Amino acid sequence: MTEPSTPTARHVPCPTCGRPALFAPDNAWRPFCSERCRGVDLGAWANERYRVEVPPAREDDDTLPE
């Protein structure tokens, strides 16, 4: 019988600094490379640096709730 193959650990670029980060359960901060990069990203969210822009609503749009 053959043993089940173990998945190989994958490295992905850290969203904050771009360094390789281990994307596996062994990395408590995945997809980040470190606790520092995870904190920097959380701070950016808290400061509302990440936004999704939407076009301004028209006043004559009947589909908007009042």
Image: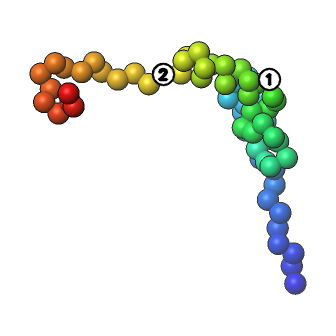
Work out whether mark 2 precedes mark 1 in sequence or the reverse, and give the earlier one.
1
Numbered circle sitting on residue 36 = 1
Q: Is residue 12 left or right of residue 62?
A: right
Residue at far bottom of view = 1
Locate residue 9, reporting x and y percent.
81, 50
Q: Residue visible at 82% across and 67% down? A: 5
Q: Residue visible at 79% across and 32% down? A: 33
Numbered circle sitting on residue 21 = none
Q: Residue visible at 75% across and 39% down? A: 30
| Mark 1 residue crowding within 10 angstroms, few (<14) / some (14–19) / many (20+) | few
Q: In this figure, which residue is indicated by the disc labeled 2?
A: 51
Residue 32 appears in the figure: yes
Residue at far front of view = 66
Q: Quadrant of residue 23?
A: top right
Give the CA distance from mark 2 to mark 1: 22 Å
Residue 11 appears in the figure: no
Q: Is residue 53 left or right of residue 39?
A: left
Q: Residue visible at 13% across and 30% down? A: 62
The quadrant in which the C terminus is found is top left
Q: 47 and 6: which one is in front?
A: 47
